[in-house]
Amino acid sequence: MRQPPGREPVPEGTLSAIMPVVLALAPTLAALIPAPVAVALGRLGATLDPATAFGNGTAARSPGWVAGWGDVGFPQHRGFPPPGFPPFGFGRADMMSHPTGPWYFQSEDSAVLGALRAMGVSVADRLLGALELTVNGLRPAPVIPVPVPVSRGYTSRVQVGVVNRAGGSIAESVAARAVRRLHLHQPQVCAFVEDVVAALTEHPAIAGLLAPASDPGSAPGSAVGAGGDAAWLAGLTEAAYVTGPPGWPGNAPADDPAEAAAALAPAAELVEEAQIAARHGARALALGIATAAAIMRRADGSPYDAATIVGLGLGSTAVHLAHAPMPAAYGPALFARRRRLFTLPRAHAGLVDVHGHELGLLEGDATLLGAGAGAGAGAADARFADNGLVALVPGGLLVRTGRADGPVNLCLEVLAEAPNAERTARQLALHDEVVEVSWHAEIGFASVVGAGPTTEQHEWREQSPPWPGDYRVRVAARGRDHDSESYELLVWSAPLRQPLVLRQTDRLGHRLRGQPEPPSPPEEKYHWIRSRGCVLCEAATITIVVGTDRDEVVRIFGANPVRPRSLHSLMDAPDRVGWLAAMNVPGTDIVVVMEENSFAGSHGPTIADLSLGGHAGSVFWNVNVDNRLSLASGGDLLLAEESLDRAPRSPALAPLFHGLDLTRFDGSVPKGLLVLERLTGYALRPQDVDRLWNDPLAHQIPPGPWPPQRPRRSVG
C-alpha cells in the first residue's frame, strides 16, 4: 500500500475493525451529501497539476500544504481554490475578482486542516448543514483507540494562523474552527484519520464501492444502499454551471461575455461532467466522514460533535482526492465540457519565454525540444529558409524569434473567420514580417510553448480550438532585429492551401532566406531606447534644448534648480511624479532633460519658451503606445503631433524627416529622436540616460494645474 515518507502503514487489524462500521454508515451519509459539494470534491484531481489543487505540494507530509488560494506559495506552483467553486460562495467566479483572497500558514502536520480551509466556508458549511443532524444522531460503538505514535514528532501546541493578503482576518467555517481546536490539543488525531481514509480508499474491500456505477445520474448512495432524488439532480444542474479560478481545465475565460453566456446555457456536456465528478466526490466523502465518525471518541467514550467529524472527514477526503486518479469516464466528459464552453473569437496576450530562438504552437504536451528545437543553429535555421519566420512541424508550428532565450511579447487570437482587409492593413503597418501557413490539427487545443513543458505555462496552455481540422495561422513579427520584439498569431478555420508571404522587411528574415540584408533605416541608431535593458523602454519624455543654460531650463519647466536628487532614488518615493533630470552636455550650450514619469516637455508653450535661445524639441511615449513629437525654434512652436505620419507640415521641416518611413507606426520613438538630432545637432547616447538616471540632477515640478499658466517669455 502506498505510504507517504516517514509514515507508518495503518495496521491491517485496525482497518478490519473500522471497515464494518464505515460500510454501515457510508450509504446513509452519501445520500445526504449536496451535489455541488460532491462536485467540488470530485473535481480536485482534475487540475492541470495535482499539486495546484491546494498548494505547492512540497511540505514534509504528503500531500504537503503551504498555500491555499491566490498566487502565493513557492515559485514552482501556485495554489488555487477548489476547482469548480468561486472563492467566496457558489456562482460564476471572475478569475481576477479575488486579488486579496485568503491564504494560510499552518504547521507541517496540518494537511487536513489546510485542505478543509482551502475548500472554503461555503462548501464546509453547506456540507455540515446537510449532515449535522444525521451525524449527531450516529452512535456507533467504540472501535479502536486513536494511537499516539511518538516517532511522528508532533508538537502539542501549534497555532494555525488564518490571514489574507490584505492583512486582516477572514471568515472560517464552523467545521474548520472545530478541527483547529482539535489540532491544537491532539494533532495526532487529524493525521490518524487522514492515514486511515487514505488506507481504506486503497483497500480491496472498499475500492470496488468507489468505482463508477453505470448510472451516473443517480445519487451516489445508490451504489451503497440509497437512491437518488430530485434534490440531487437539481444540485447537479447547479454545480454544472459553476466555473472557478485557474487550475481546473473546465473553466471558461471570465472576461469574455460570450463565454459567460455559453456557460449558463443548458448543455448536456456540462451536466455529464458534473455527474461523474459528483459521484467520484460523494462516495469518497461519505467514506471519509464515516471513517471519522467510527474513530472519533472523547476520553469518556462519547462521540465528537458533528462539526469536528464532518470537518475531519471533509479535510481528509480533500487531501486524498487532490492526488487520486480521476474516473476513466471523466477525461472525455471534461473534454466535451471544454469544447462546449469554447466560443469565438477569443484572445490572450502576455509574455512567453522563448528557447533556442523559437516558440511554438503545438498540440498535446509537446515541448520545443521534442519539436526539434535546439538541434543546432544550422539545422534549426534551415527549417525557416522558405519564409524566414514560421515552420510547420509534427503537431503544430514553430516561430523563429530574434532572441535566443528570454521573454517576448505575444498576442494570440482565435477568430471566427479570416481577418478582414482593415485588420490586415493594420498588421502590415505595424510588423516587419507577416506570413500565413496552413496547419492540420490532429486533436485540437494546441498550446503556446516556450522554454519548459506546457504544464508549467498554464496561461498559454490549450489556446487553439479544441477540434481537429484544418486551420490557417497568420504569424506577424516586429523588432526581431532589436531587443524589443513582439509577435501576433491569428488562427481561424480554413481549408489547407499554400503559404502566403504578406511582408518581409527585417534583416533576420533576409538572412534566414539566404537573401542580402536590406540597408538599415536611418533611425536604427536609436533602437536601444526601447530595449529591455534601458530604463526608458516603456515610457519617458526626452527634451533637448540648444542656447539656454541648465538652471534656466529647469526654471522654464517650473522647477527650482536647487537640492537635486537622482531619479533612481525616487523609485519608491510617494511623490515620484513630476520630476525631471537635466544635464549640460560638456563643452556645448546643449541641455538634455529626461522625465521618466512625467510629460511636461511635451507641452507646446513650454517647448516654445525653451527654444527662445535657439532650438528645442521633445519626444514623449508611454506604455499605451501614445507618442508626441514637439519642435520649436526661436520661440515659435513648429510642430506638435501625436502621429509621425502627419508630422511634416511645411517644406521647411521636410529635411528633418528625410529618409524616414512615416507610413509605419513602429519605431516612432527612434524616429523622433533622430528628428531631434537633426534639429538640435545632438545625438542622445545611452550614457546620457545612465547619467540622468543615476546622478543627482533631478528637480521636482511643484504640483499644480496642468497645463501650467504663466506669461510667455520673449527673446532677450
Image (cartoon, rainbow, N blue to C red):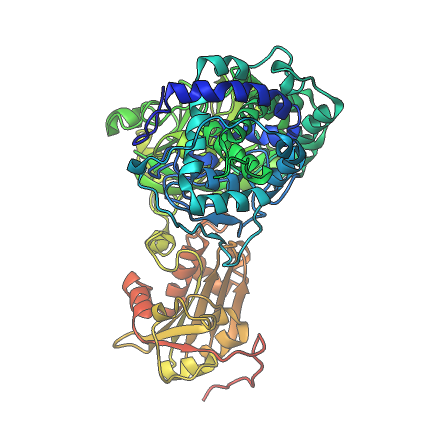
Residue 422: x percent and y percent? Answer: 61, 39
Residue at the extreme front of the image, as rendered? 300
Residue at the extreme top of the image, as rendered? 214
Q: Nearer the viewer, residue 225 or 693?
A: 225
Q: Nearer the viewer, residue 142 or 417?
A: 142
Q: Nearer the viewer, residue 512 or 367?
A: 367
On screen, residue 119 above or below 529: above
Q: Is residue 306 left or right of residue 509?
A: right
Residue at the extreme bottom of the image, as rendered? 716
- Looking at the rendered image, the quarter that the N terminus falls into is top left
Question: Quick check: can you spot residue 570?
Answer: yes
The residue depicted at 33 percent of the width and 24 percent of the height is: 383
User: Which of the 4 image quadrants contains residue 364?
Assistant: top left
The residue depicted at 51 percent of the width and 39 percent of the height is: 116
On screen, residue 73 above or below 330: below
Q: Is residue 440 left or right of residue 338?
A: left
Q: Nearer the viewer, residue 626 or 638?
A: 626
Residue 616: x percent and y percent? Answer: 43, 73
On screen, residue 437 above or below 692: above
Q: Is residue 586 left or right of residue 81?
A: left
Residue 351: x percent and y percent? Answer: 43, 42
Q: How many marks?
A: 0
